[in-house]
Amino acid sequence: MRNFLSLRNLSRGVIEELLEHARHLKRNPHSLDLLNKVVGLVFMNPSLRTLASMQAGISQLGGSSFVIQPGQNSWNLEFEDGAVMDGITVEHVKEAIPVLGKYCDILGIRSFALQHNLAEDLEDRRMGVMAELSPVPFVNLESASDHPCQALADWLTIDECGIGRSEKFVLSWAFHPKPLPFAVPRAALSMAAQRGMEIVIHGPQGYELPDQMMSELQSFGARSVQFETDRRKALNGARVLYCKSWVQHRLYGDPEKEMNARSALRENWCVREKWFEDYAPHAKFMHCLPVRRNVKVEDRVLDNDRSIVIQQSENRLHVQKAVLARLAQEVKA
Ligand code: CP
């Protein structure tokens, strides 16, 4: 494994090995897997969990790290070929990434979707370009349409809850004031599909997922995949309700129109404890965090034992350490 860009291009065997090592590291947090190694971390967007868990994990593995935040503690980066850089961008990724690769042994980058062009974002073009430019092993810390560190942590968390590989996984849309990209929904759904789960995507009309995202799930091994607007049908028998908001893909690139379309959905699409009481009493509640309380999810859900959001966040630390330890082997090889 030269790069960790997505769970979607990893074999089941590699995923199982990473999970096994993460379980080991959860029991035995300290090792020397990154002794004398430096991990470069580039955050184009804000973070609490990813930044803190990466730095803590690197330290627990005996390594060290530096953090670059373009536009804050560093130059704004340019991505376009042939750009005339007379605006806010000061440095091109064609220089920045190879230079950073001279200072570190592994590079991790977060770069969210621009939400201008759906096809480009689903292709994850920017992350792909940066990975190709990187002279050292590379970790995707959330890109335009993937969040593999979150997906691997979620896989571990679902396993820890004793939820079977073929049980029912519901990804529910929830209201958020702004249109959000497909990174976490795609990562969570791919993870559930690779586990072989029965997948239901629950959302209001208009929030169906792009065809590309739906069709790939079957090929990853999902037991079944469907979009369902009816809450009773969607939640009935669910073992996981994973909540996330996403943009209406037919209005991709038009945030004003999208926000007008979603404004009427606020009341009926805040996840409530009653959803579980009425339809899914045995379901765990999952969310990648951060979450807007009482907008996207009501307090009673987040403060209930069914919520495993803290466990998901904790597991980010353990799985990322397993990924870094494996990439460090690449550095040695
Ligand atoms: N879930 C997640 O990636 O959290 P942060 O955005 O805080 O890193």
Image (cartoon, rainbow, N blue to C red):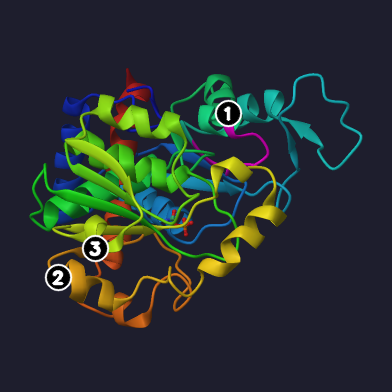
Q: Is residue 236 left or right of residue 203?
A: left
Badge 1 vs badge 2, beta-carbon distance below 8 Å:
no
Mark 3 = which residue? 232
Numbered mark located on residue 119 in the image: 1
Q: Which residue is mark 2?
A: 281
Graded by Cα atoms within 10 Å as few (under 14), some (14 to 19) or many (20 or more), the crowding at tag 1 reads few
Pinpoint residue 177: horizontal percent, then vertical percent: 59, 66
- Compared across the picture, whether 3 is left or right of 219 comes to right
The image quadrant that residue 113 belongs to is top right
Query: Magenta residues, as a range?
Result: 108-118
Badge 2 element: loop
Q: Is residue 272 visible?
A: yes
Check whether the beta carbons of the residues at disc 2 and disc 3 lie within 8 A of each other.
Answer: no
Numbered tag placed on residue 12 in the rendering: none
Amino acid on which disc 2 is placed: Pro
* Residue located 39% across and 72% down the image: 297
Residue at 71% x, 56% y: name it.
256
Q: Residue 101's x, y, as percent?
A: 56, 28
Q: Residue 63 appears at what percent x and percent y?
A: 39, 44
Q: Secondary structure at mark 1?
A: helix
Amino acid identity at mark 1: Ala
